[in-house]
Image (cartoon, rainbow, N blue to C red):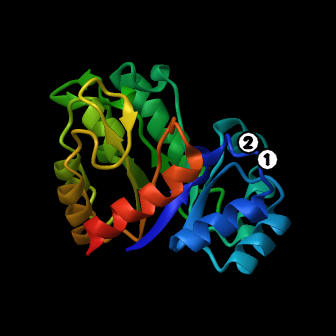
């Protein structure tokens, strides 16, 4: 698996993208994941200059729906292997009928692009539904892939290892995030998520990219190094 950092982690860094990417490259990551497309041509050039790959790009639902052609062209310019829908609100998972509608929505969106569309979970997808959760129903009813966030799944009281195993072949990207017992993001190794088991399960499930994300780091610069060091220790 290759290692990347989700650039949302570094949103408080008031530096040009090229400088941020240089920091990431110097730390030893293989690539990055974008939180929004921005200027795809400039971003692609900055990636090339830094010697970094790209794990994917997060695109909001409104953009996917309103102008899929532009999004597709931008993803091609970035050479992003995956387009990731990073969030759907609670209403999309509130009932069996809601999940059925969400399934239809995701399949329709995926058909608009020449590369896979992935859905990124938080914790609210794991509300009880039938004999399982809304997330279980989403997995059963769709053919799309997932960018599985192990930290949010664990915060929802789920076993991220078992869920990754269930998603075998459909989980090309895993967000490696640690959480406190209270469900708050924390540095890798400081929380309660079974990180080594998550990494091992991801490897067995065919995951291509392991992406470090910290939703609210105290020091983004230190988080860059801590993230790659934490992932490297788990991958060795």
For mark 2, does the 10 Å Cα neighbourhood hold few (<14), some (14 to 19), or many (20 or more) residues? few
x and y, in percent, of residue 103 in the image: 45, 40
Q: Name the residue under label 2.
A: 63
Q: Determine which quarter of the picture holds residue 138.
A: top left
The residue that appears at 70% across and 41% down in the rendered structure is 65
Give 177 or 224, whichever is nearer the viewer: 224
For mark 1, does the 10 Å Cα neighbourhood hold few (<14), some (14 to 19), or many (20 or more) residues? few
Give 176 or 234, whichever is nearer the viewer: 234
Label 1, secondary structure: give it. Answer: loop
Q: Mark 1 points at which residue?
A: 67
Q: Can the viewer see residue 54?
A: no
Is the Cβ of the residue at disc 2 closer than 8 Å to that at disc 1? yes
Q: Can the viewer see residue 220?
A: yes
Q: Which of marks 2 and 1 is in front?
A: 2
x and y, in percent, of residue 27 in the image: 53, 69
x and y, in percent, of residue 50 in the image: 69, 76
């Amino acid at each position: 698996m290759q290692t990347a950092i989700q650039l949302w982690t570094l949103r408080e860094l008031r530096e040009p993208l090229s400088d941020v990417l240089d920091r990431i490259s110097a730390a030893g990551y293989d690539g990055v994941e974008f939180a929004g497309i921005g200027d795809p041509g400039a971003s692609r050039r900055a990636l090339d200059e830094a010697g970094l790959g790209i794990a994917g790009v997060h695109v909001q639902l409104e953009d996917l729906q309103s102008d899929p052609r532009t999004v597709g062209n931008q993803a091609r310019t970035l050479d992003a292997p995956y387009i990731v829908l990073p969030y759907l609100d609670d209403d999309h998972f509130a009932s069996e009928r809601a999940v059925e509608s969400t399934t239809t929505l995701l399949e329709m969106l995926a058909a608009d692009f020449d590369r896979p569309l992935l859905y990124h979970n938080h914790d609210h997808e794991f509300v009880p539904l039938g004999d399982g959760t809304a997330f279980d129903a989403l997995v059963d009813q769709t053919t799309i892939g997932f960018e599985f966030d192990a930290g949010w799944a664990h915060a929802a009281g789920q076993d991220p290892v078992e869920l990754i195993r269930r998603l075998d072949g459909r989980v090309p990207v895993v967000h490696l995030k640690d959480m406190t017992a209270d469900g708050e993001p924390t540095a890798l190794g400081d929380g309660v998520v079974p990180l080594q088991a998550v990494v091992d399960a991801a490897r067995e499930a065919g995951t291509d990219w392991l992406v470090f994300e910290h939703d609210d780091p105290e020091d983004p610069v230190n988080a860059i190094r801590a993230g790659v060091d934490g992932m490297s220790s788990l991958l060795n």
